[in-house]
Image (cartoon, rainbow, N blue to C red):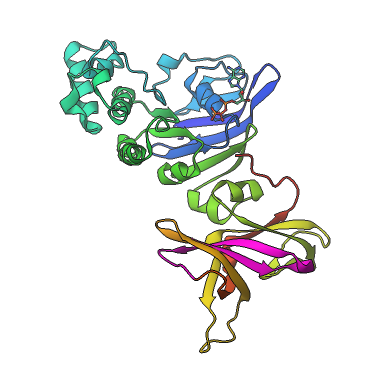
Amino acid sequence: MSALVFEHVSHAYGEVLAVDDISLAIERQELVCLLGPSGCGKTTALRVAAGLEPLQHGRVLMNDRVVADGTVDVPPERRNVGLVFQDYALFPHLSVIENVAFGLAGRTAAERKAGALAALTQVGMREYAEAYPHLLSGGQQQRVALARALAPKPSVMLLDEPFSGLDRQLRNQVRDEALHVLKESGAATLMVTHDPEEAMFMADRVALMRAGKIVQVGPPSELYLAPRDAFVAGFFGEVNRIGGTVEGGQVATPLGTLEAKGLASGTPVDVLIRPEGLRLDTISAAAPHPDGVVARVLAARMLGRSSLIHLSVAGANGHDLHLHARIPGRYLPAEAAEMSISLDRSQAFVFPAAGLTPDR
Ligand code: ATP
């Protein structure tokens, strides 16, 4: 039994088709990120699940119960969902514990207090129970918002860009804590984000959207290592692009020949290579004939956990290719040095050249 199911859900605002026939099932204790560029329909999908937008097409089910179709439309407060938004939305005139207890209407005062304290303990904010929101940092306010959403023990948690109002260091810390709290809560979580790194950090599965449609859904590693198209490949980070043409099921590049399965001879393709898919070896007197192709170092910069090396490789028709290689740690070859460059084929993808630009 899935906790939250979208079945062929579409939603338009006037002429704008914001969500275009999406289907997705989220299990108990699973965290799924809806990822995609701005305006692709993520928030609309989440609002439809919450009941904040009336359903137009398709069905939404929660725990095997239809909560929205053409005839049923369970109101948001009766869907047993917890909502967290970017702006925390705490009541400024209520203390932290009163804010959290607010979600527990209809219970006795003692139950509300106990429930609110338990939720505040879950997010590490029990000691701030009597404080008022304006005295808290952004990260603390977001923890309280999370506690408020979790307090009624919802079966589904819906989070819309919950960390994007926080600065980077705080964001990393708060989302780390939130990941564990959400997983422990047992709820099915759907979280909207436009940040691929955040999605990979948080998600059991990522559903990548583009122009209202889900393009690919799966564990982060699957989207990263087996992208369905160039948009998916490019969305998860920088890629080197080399143009080519298929000949006999293969495409020749200055870095070697790659399989181009299922593509007819003559098809123009783009070969996408992740920077970490390029290996570099020094050329020395001891190893004068390395396996790879010769590349010239244009620049090398340490970026923290990895180094980025700008390389020039002789391409077809006398046009040099400018490639980026990413090597873990400190790796800073001298400018103008010649290196041997070779390809990790698991990090190289071949797609038809049409519709390539990832609109991030
Ligand atoms: P963002 O990350 O920028 O919030 P998103 O992926 O969440 O984007 P939505 O907010 O769902 O996307 O918007 C999808 C499309 O629907 C966009 O073209 C947007 O302009 C449009 N849209 C969203 N809300 C409304 C509304 N209330 N009225 C009219 N158009 C809307």
- Image point (55%, 56%), residue name: 225
Q: Name the residue located 50 percent from the left edge and 71 percent from the top edge.
A: 334
Question: Front-most of 341 and 179?
Answer: 341
Query: 312 left or right of 72?
Result: right
Question: Is residue 337 left or right of 199 when viewed as pictured?
Answer: right
Picture quarter with the N terminus? top left
In the rendered view, tell whether residue 14 sits above or below residue 159.
above
- In what quadrant does ligand 1 lie? top right
Of the pair 204 and 200, the residue shown nearer to us? 200
Q: Quadrant of residue 290?
A: bottom right
When asked about the image quadrant of residue 19, the answer is: top right
Q: Is residue 33 magenta?
A: no
Q: Residue furthest bottom?
A: 286
> Does the magenta portion include 312?
yes
Residue 46 at x, y = what percent?
50, 26
The span shown in magenta is 308-333
* Image spot of residue 137 (x, y percent): 28, 27
Q: Residue at x 60, y 49 (%)?
A: 234
Visible residue check, residue 229: no
Q: Is residue 33 visible?
A: yes
The one of 35 and 113 positioned closer to us in this rendering: 35
In the rendered structure, the answer to whether residue 252 lies left or right of residue 193 reads right
From the top left corner, tell me how far across and down residue 325 is, in percent: 54, 63
Quarter holding the C terminus is: top right
